[in-house]
Amino acid sequence: MNRIDRLHGRKVGIIGMARSGVAAAELVRQLGGLPFVSDVQPHEALEEPISRLKQEGIPFECGGHTERLLESDYLIISPGVPSGLPILARAAETGIPIFSEIELAFWVCRGQVLAVTGSNGKTTTTALLGEICRASGRPTVVAGNIGTPFSSVARQVPEDGLAVLEVSSFQLERIEQFAPQVSILLNLTPDHLDRYDSFDGYCAAKYRIFENQTPGQFAVLNADDPVTIGRPFPYAGHQLYFSVGESTYPGQFPEGVIQREGRLVGRMAGQEIDIIAVDQIGIPGPHNHANAAAATAAALACGIAPDVIAAAMERFRGVEHRLEYVDTIGGVRFINDSKGTNVDAVVVALKSVPGGVNLIAGGRDKAGDFTRLLPAAQGKVRHLVLVGEAREKIFLQLGKHIPVVMAKSMAEAVQKAFELAHPGDTVLLSPGCASFDMYRNFEERGRDFKSLIKRLKNGNGREATRET
């Protein structure tokens, strides 16, 4: 869907100076447009992106959004920009179209797009699907909410290439023509309820991933997810289903991928396709088997051979910041799950970690209901070590059931969690919250956690030499 005509010679206002905003501005400039970038943060907080914009000769403003944005032919917004900004309301009143950064990049991408969304598992599934696509020999980029803005790589994708994207509900709010060849919806659990009026509103944003698909494109859905199965599907994309519930489809199953007798089995065009034994998949756990099944369904839809899929899944070992093993000190394991930014992600993490757990949680609340942690946490979590803006809320919801320790920083949280741990225990960072109260993003939070573990191991923590 090449729409360069929408950009050449046009004034394009870009709201948000994070990675995707700067990438969008650079793309607009490359295609003959006239970008202008605006951010509410002060100059001193934006030194790196401002330096890039100056190098490219792209005008910008910081410290607030001015009337200059209303001179634009179009507005492009970064994913983290609040939907209720007054400048967006004024733009809408004056008839200025507003698009997300993935919509902009889609206009100029010549290859096929494979898009992954859902409440949990997006990053792992996107990375795994990217590895499978690369193994097939087709030119492949992996981008979107996974860390690389789509705008920075969209023009690199040839006609026979693939763009594998992690896509958030925020990005889907402002699409117009975005129509992936394969759209995957992994699951739906309450998240971002600080942004949406209701869980249904959040689900509706996720389902926009399907709305522009044609009958020749594919919609991959989770047969084990009650929210997904209970929701109407009034879209044109050809439906594929994935399931890891051994009893979900005891006989013949619809097109897609299921787990049967310990193996992933596909069904396409009436033919069953044996893929791999689940115990050979490089990422363990039922949640990861579901992610692998979803990625397999997408890969089969693209015509990728089963042996290529299986080999890539055996090699794949997961992604940084998602249940990432960091180190063991004094018999205590440290796991970095900084990507666990909602309550259900923490539940998955707790179910995946053996033994007693000292859980580091907290950050910026997304209207999460932390009482939903109790079934997985009781009898397993020895202590909750709480940090960030949400720590008082989490304490009020869980403090009567689980011992709580408060910390003022990640460094203090790591030290206290380690001091409270027994040999054989795990210190798990799985915050259940966004990172923006203390860090720029979840990656920075995870890197800080890992650097503190390294310091602890090097003897800078007073308990680092604990006897085993």
Image (spheres, helix red, strand yellow):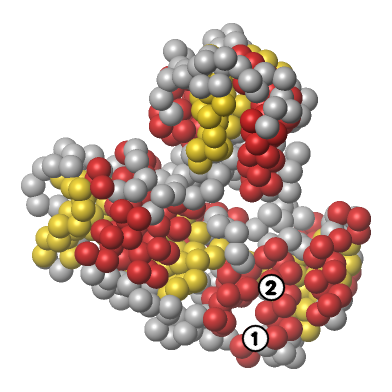
User: Dot 2 corresponds to which residue?
Assistant: 24
Graded by Cα atoms within 10 Å as few (under 14), some (14 to 19) or many (20 or more), the crowding at tag 1 reads some
Please give the label number shown on residue 6. Answer: 1
Front residue of this view, candidates 137 and 430: 137
Residue 95: percent from the left, percent from the top?
72, 73
Front residue of this view, candidates 2 and 155: 155
Tell me if residue 368 can be seen.
no
Q: Is residue 313 left or right of residue 403?
A: left
| Residue in the image at 44% along x and 34% along y | 348
Secondary structure under the numbered disc 1 in the rendered image: helix
Graded by Cα atoms within 10 Å as few (under 14), some (14 to 19) or many (20 or more), the crowding at tag 2 reads many
Q: Is residue 45 left or right of residue 102?
A: right
Q: Amino acid at mark 2?
A: Ala
Most distant residue in the left direction: 251
Q: Amino acid at mark 1?
A: Arg
Secondary structure under the numbered disc 2 in the rendered image: helix
Q: Is residue 155 left or right of residue 161?
A: right
Does label 2 or label 1 sit earlier along the sequence?
1
Residue 134: percent from the left, percent from the top?
39, 70
